[in-house]
Amino acid sequence: MSDRGFGGRRAARALMLALGIVGAWDLAGAGHLGARQVRDARVRPAGTGTIGGRVLTADAEARPVRRAVVTLSGEGLGQSRSVVTGDDGRFELERLPAGRFSLIATKPGYLDGSFGARRPGGDGTTIALEAGGRLEATLRLTHGAVLAGVVRDERGRPVRNIAVMAVSVTTASAGTGAGAATTEVRTNDRGEYRVYGLPPGRYVIGANPMDQRSDAFDRREEAEMDALLAALRQRGTAPAPAAAPNAGEPTAAGETATWGFPLTFYPGTPAYGQAERFRVAAGETRAGLDFIVAPVRMAVIAGTVTSGDGRPPGRVQMSMIIDGPTTSVFTGSRPALSRAGDDEGAFRYTNVPPGRYRIVVRESDEAPTTPSMGIGASTGGGILPARQAGDATRYRFAMTDVDVNGQPVTTLALVLQPGATVAGHVEVTSDSGRRPDLSRVLVGFRPEAGGGSSSVNGTMFGGAISVVRPVAVQADGAFAIPDVGPGDYLLSHTIPGDLATEWRLQSAMLDGVDLLDVPLTVRDGGPIAGLVVTITDRHTELAGSLQTPAGEAAPEYVIVVFPRDPALRRAGSRRVATTRPGTDGGFDVRDLPPGDYLLAALTDVTPDDFDDPTFFDQLAAAAIPIAIRDGERTVQDVRIGG
Amino acid sequence: MGSDRPGVAMHAHHVMALVTVLWLAAAGASAARQVAVAPGRAPSQPLAQAPATTGTGAITGTVVDQTTGLEIGGALVTLLDRSVTGPLARRPASTLTDRRGRFAFVDLPASNAWTLGVAAAGYLDHPADPDVPPGRLGLADGQWRADVRLEITPAGSIGGVVTDEAGDPVVGAWVRLLTRVPVAGTSYLAGGPITRTDDRGAYFIGGLQPGTYYVVMPSVQAAVPGDADAAAIAGITPAIAAQRSSRGITTPIPVEHAVDADPRARLILGDYPVPPGAPRTAYPITFHPGGSTIESATAIALGAGEQRDGADLRLAPVPTVSISGRVDGPAEALAGLTLRLLPESLTALGPGSEAATARVAADGTFVLLGVPAGRYVLTAPAALAEYQTYSMIRSLRLPGPPGRSSGGYSSRSVTSAPAGTQFTTWSGGYLAGDACAWGRTTIDAGATDVTDARLVLRPCMTISGRVTMEGAPGPGEPPPVLGVTAQAADGDPSLGQPNPPPRGDGPADAFEIPGLLPGQYLLQARGLARGWVVKSIVHQGRDYTDTPFDTTGGDDYAGVQVTFTNRTAEIDGRVQTGAPGAAATPTVVVLFPVDRRLWTNYGREPARLRSALAGSDGSFSFASLQAGEYFVAAVAVVAGSTPAPWQTPGWLANAAANAERVTVDWGGHATVSPRVAEVRR
């Protein structure tokens, strides 16, 4: 096999391996997998095993890391055991029972380092410790990367106490901040910020003044101020109020403030799409990321929410989603939503910074509460609680996207439309013939990860409002999920904890498509029937060992198991698993849905790889087929280079 | 726990992060930053109709640096009409100053309480004298108040580096400022801003008012029973676990970092730096420059705008002992109980200031690990509270003990302490059950383990009685008082804030305050309507209106008679100034009782001590007073000076010499004209 086949980026560190099958047994029947036993955590077993070693820096110098906390955990150990390294980086864990353990070193400023990990933050190797065994382990810690700079205002003076976030765009889908991990710090009195302990990757830096200077304001340049004061002197009183073209919410002084500080991204833009995305190497310190947060004109977004059928809107909840990282952008007072006068359904957002927004309306036929001018920044509007028995509340929806850049947008017309009703029933498959209390199971829909956001002119909106209320299944298994608004959804469900130890969801089939794997697209309010949800107490397990050509354990590799059907291969799918063999080469993957799979071994896998649409295709070329059957344990030993 | 894939949890997180605006949700208007106003200000009065939003008045002026007199461009000036509060209040108007520091507000309606605030990089939002907002103006129709000079004070800062015994930087260490505040005549340690060191071991705390500060690195040695599992350490109780599974939450419980110290106990690592050999050695609580007690600490006297660098802390490991023993008390109080071991000089502080904590095992035994030598107070706290100073920066919060979140706190301002002082209480204490019990004992830790410590839990005390109204609320007015509660007369924060439950099935005029600890308590009204005051508090023929109830003997008090009246007294007037125009100097008017026994032990929200800022014409007013004999003192604020708090007996004694003396009866009214005195501030 050749490096060339895998593209330069991955070739160096994720060398894929040709595999040979050593032996495969399908232990039909023999391996019936029921509920797992609950381990008694209060047992503190002791033994005669020892794990000792050193924690060293991951760079070429390999210096000892003092004061690192090394923690051993795993089944058979009871509780975790930690120890602090000495000046020579050494640690020693004694009186250990036999078992399979993971070992991790942590120290502030460093990235967590698991024993056997191929890179910082990567999965480690499971340690298989025999009774009385001794393992000498070396753990490597990589210094976290540092991003630092100064935030200044237009006049070059430091902006203090402003929230600065480092948005990791490595794990985010291209073009959207959805799913991005953010680390937030605040500038000090000198405007300095310093984000440390970051994993290597691509980052965007943003400063969020929303909570700092929460209100819009006026500004006058020197000449304007001179003119105003001259006019006051002449009249001895204030000039007549001037009409403002872009009126915000009236302030105490009755003025119409139109300026504000927007969320600003390095190197100095309010548009997330124009933010610089820079790559930071492991342990790199990138200082001098200075930028200016300057005031911009704020806009008004106004319009109406009306019914398609003439029925007056009931209780209306609106949400506004900005294009960009999902951060606490608007938990402050901006933008402000007001109900303008007595106009039926009129809405008005003021103080809206430049950007691209999605406005989502969810209306219920509950009686409106007492109207009040007010702003609620709430998380409760996003998630609806499960529908209780007898709750006949109905919902309608409207949605629109809008770009603003300082100019008012005042003519938005949002027309409420009914959602779809999805009906079906729950089936139970069980070898024991048992049946759980189905009335305790909830089913609903969740927007497909990232799919609740949608692309507008090539830019994705980050995040989505959850619009479907889960319903309880009836005792006979029937269910109907009403008011599913437009969008792409995967089936969601809740099985209470005591049932979930035994029962799990196997499939949700509609017209031959499994809605646990492939999203359902709802466009209008037409009824959808015939959804069959299957609950089972059967489990699956895939176990085996990975060996070198010489037949020895090969713990340094990563195993990826993925569906044989290309249509089911998607990052984040329940059908994709990665695992690492232990020091004895053993691996174990549980509860993959039954089906045909491929198994591949690589030297490393990063989250980036799963973003690459050709990743699975490349793996498939050198993978071996595996069949996982319902309720069975599949054993598959694998040899490298076969 | 088979529910949804991890994507669900991630998705829920995204939804949480979205802003969702509830159209019809009742919520406060936008909370803009406002400068503090003088304590003792009158409660807000709802207006019947919306105020005018435009008018013909104007306010213009300049923002200048108080210390240098230089003009400050780019400062954000806000203007708020304080005569309008409640739902009709408008958002503050804001404007940026131009290059020459000038600002202008025009088209203003008339008001007697326009209040100006300033925010500028490197300056305090808060004025140097926290009692005095930088500008409060009356404005008539058509009036132009020109050349208003807003002086703002540069913010101070304290910074330094935390290193360990090898000189290596300590990364992620918590660093906190402490200061002292006078409350009801007693000085207490108060918590200041909290930050963490960066990857260079450096910390920086800015936005500081002038004052005296200590720098401390907290270091809590947190022990849990040997059988506590990861869920218990993460605070996932059986009830929370049930909620998690019913909601389908499958996020894994993080693996705890813990040292097996003793068969009976484990030391939890992660929140504070730990040397090798823990728990037999520990980094103790460390004050700048390196001592482990506040007595050994260097106090930093920070001037206005002073940037103090080099306030370093050097950590050194010390040998420690374990303290084990037993808690005697009812089983329901022992379940989930966490004990606090506080250095004797830090007992006024809340979570995160302990030397060690220990979760009590189900059988009542406990083990405290990693305790450096010293004198401590061991408590089973029924209340958790501390004083905190105003922080301009957004402060972090210290982590709570394992199994307890540090959240669930609330703060209220202390009217008897310098403005900006907050009294912060944590809900629930470290006691799990509803049964209120407390325990407290002194422990000396030396060179050897303590194995026979004993802590006895005792029940809390109760004060109960009846409420009488003299007078009746007007038609449509709310009930004059919602209830009766108690406050520590001497301000002792360890007594917490009793939170009486809503009235049960008993008579409508009955009240009951359970949950009291041994101490001195003053009764106070809860939710007192404007225009009502406490007239008297009587128990067994003895007057307790200004006298605290003593619960140190473990006694309950029943049959207490609390009488409220709407025949309140009022004192108003106008300060006498020397030269015309001198009224432009901010003047604070302080009202306090003539009886000097009432200059201490008056609690956090005293009825008889007030202060107010005189208007631009020198007028002031104190309403809703109890009858009695009062001093009224007027104090000019000297620019650039560091103010002394007026709430101390020494200040009051000094002020009394130049004060007007006046007596008012119930329902009475008096007018005084105090001379602006040269009381040193």
Image (spheres, rainbow, N blue to C red):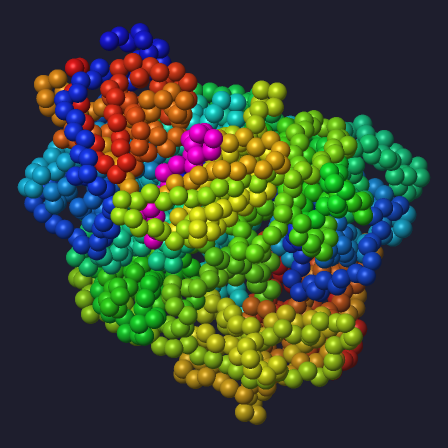
Is residue A189 shown left or right of residue B92?
A: left
Residue visible at 35% across and 19% down in the picture: A616
Is residue A464 shown left or right of residue A142?
A: right
Q: Is residue A428 something one can see in this rendering?
A: yes
Residue visible at 46% across and 62% down in the picture: B427
Number of marks drawn: 0
Of A555 and B554, the residue lying toward us:
A555
Is residue A97 shown left or right of residue B339?
A: left
Q: Taking A578 as reference, is B470 above or below it?
A: below
Q: Which residues are magenta?
A: A498-518
Q: Is residue A501 magenta?
A: yes
**Residue B561 in picture, x, y percent from top left:** 59, 86
Quarter assignment of residue B273: top left
Of B331 and A567, the residue lying toward us:
A567
Is residue B64 shown left or right of residue B619?
A: left
Quarter assignment of residue B658: bottom right
Residue visible at 54% across and 92% down in the picture: B540
**Residue A398 in picture, x, y percent from top left:** 66, 36
Of B402 and B146, the residue lying toward us:
B402
Q: Residue furthest bottom?
A: B541
**Residue B34 in picture, x, y percent from top left:** 66, 50
